[in-house]
Image (cartoon, grey):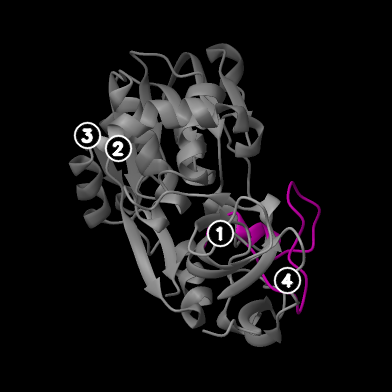
């Protein structure tokens, strides 16, 4: 079978003002470069869309470089090696790499890692066994300094990261696990996953809903949302509480600066620690994460959800829908 000489890829057509629209993306075909020594040719089977990508659509300095106009977007993907000139990689290997948003990719073998898809699906390495899984584990254990007996509140709890934070906290000895989500169906799913309480943040003031769900207060807040959720968590925080700030999806599409929580002075008297984190800081916890979470996955103690969209053409809409909260668990795009 002849090898492909072209790839289809999604490029950034324009920078959004507020929420992204389909017009901000464009599907193009481009010639593939010839395979060089040390490189592999990969046909992607599944790719990830993640909230952090919204920040990369803006032309601002951040912890990852912004996407460039008329250049392909990138992100996590898993695919099959269809040709290799890199030692350690053979045709048929499944690999995890960072050149998503396209159906075929040429990349150095050093920028890919082999994954075993015999026991877990390829998409698991973009979710529960990938960056979201490590984010959940490291954010809870390291950034939030979780300890057994803590009462934990997770916002955006039905998403890829939040749903795992709640389950890991419960299995690690949390006294109470509370989650917020954006629909009655998601709230029901959180309870299925073992959350002690969950609420739909659209049903009223988050501050009041949280106090009802955790009347004795919380020790740890894992923040995926920011805004009113952060303010509510500070209000419910016990003495020496800890906040791990992972994301602020409520503000990603905002066109005006968000108002900071109005109760920040409570951090003083309550001796609250608030720590922002990026998962790359905790790459050294990867082995600990796999050793801890792996057995829970194997015996079914942890389960995970995926929202699947089909086809590269639908990747932009999948991303737009992700930012609007249309996903339960990990949003992925299947390309095969």
Q: Tell me whether the residue at label 2 lies in contact with that at label 3, contact meaning CB atoms closer than 8 angstroms.
A: yes
| Quarter in which the C terminus is drawn | bottom left
Q: Which picture quadrant has residue 211?
A: top left
Looking at marks 4 and 2 on the same chain, the residue that comes earlier in the sequence is marked by 4
Q: Mark 1 to mark 3: distance in Å?
A: 31 Å
Q: CA distance from mark 4 to mark 2?
A: 37 Å
As drawn, 311 above or below 162: below
Q: What residue sits 45% from the left and 74% below the top?
A: 335
Magenta residue span? 49-74
Disc 2 versus disc 1: nearer the observer: 1
- Circle 2 residue: 297
83 or 201, which lies in front? 83
Mark 4 or 2, closer to the camera: 4
Q: Is residue 331 left or right of residue 253?
A: left
Examine the residues drawn in magenta and state their main secondary structure: loop
Q: Earlier in the sequence, mark 1 or mark 3?
A: 1
Disc sitting over residue 299 in the figure: 3
Which residue is tagged 4?
A: 35
Of mark 3 and mark 4, the one earlier in the sequence is: 4
- Quadrant position of residue 108: bottom right
Q: Secondary structure at mark 1?
A: loop
Q: CA distance from mark 3 to mark 4?
A: 42 Å
Q: Position of residue 262 (x, y in %)?
A: 58, 35
**Location of mark 1 (residue):** 90
Q: Nearer the viewer, mark 3 or mark 4?
A: 4
Q: Quadrant of residue 244?
A: top right
* Res 276 visible: no
Mark 2 closeness class: few <14, some 14–19, many ≥20 residues within 10 Å: some
């Amino acid at each position: 079978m002849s090898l492909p000489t072209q790839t289809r890829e999604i490029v950034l057509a324009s920078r959004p003002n507020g929420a992204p629209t389909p017009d901000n993306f464009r599907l193009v075909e481009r010639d593939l470069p010839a395979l060089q020594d040390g490189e592999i040719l990969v046909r992607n089977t599944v790719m990830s869309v993640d909230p952090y990508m919204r920040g990369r659509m803006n032309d601002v300095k951040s912890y990852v470089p912004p996407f460039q106009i008329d250049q392909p977007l990138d992100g996590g993907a898993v695919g099959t090696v269809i040709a290799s000139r890199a030692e350690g990689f053979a045709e048929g290997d499944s690999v995890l790499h960072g050149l998503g948003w396209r159906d075929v990719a040429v990349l150095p073998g050093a920028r890919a890692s082999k994954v075993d898809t015999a026991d877990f699906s390829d998409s698991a390495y973009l979710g529960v066994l990938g960056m979201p899984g490590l984010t959940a584990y490291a954010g809870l254990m390291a950034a939030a300094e979780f300890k057994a007996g803590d009462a934990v509140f997770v916002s955006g709890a039905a998403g890829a990261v939040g749903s795992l934070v709640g389950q890991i906290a419960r299995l690690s000895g949390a006294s109470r696990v509370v989650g917020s989500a954006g629909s009655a169906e998601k709230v029901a799913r959180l309870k299925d996953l073992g959350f002690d309480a969950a609420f739909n943040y659209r049903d009223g003031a988050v501050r009041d809903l949280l106090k009802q769900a955790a009347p004795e207060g919380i020790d740890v807040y894992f923040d995926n949302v920011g805004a009113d959720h952060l303010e509510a968590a500070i209000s419910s925080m016990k003495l020496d509480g800890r906040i791990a700030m992972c994301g602020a999806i409520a503000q990603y599409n905002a066109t005006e600066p968000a108002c900071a929580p109005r109760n920040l002075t409570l951090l003083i008297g309550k001796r609250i620690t608030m720590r922002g984190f990026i998962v790359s800081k905790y790459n050294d916890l990867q082995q600990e994460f796999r050793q801890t979470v792996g057995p829970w996955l194997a015996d079914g103690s942890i389960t995970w959800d995926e929202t699947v969209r089909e086809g590269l053409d639908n990747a932009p809409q999948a991303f737009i829908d992700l930012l609007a909260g249309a996903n339960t668990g990990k949003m992925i795009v299947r390309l095969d």
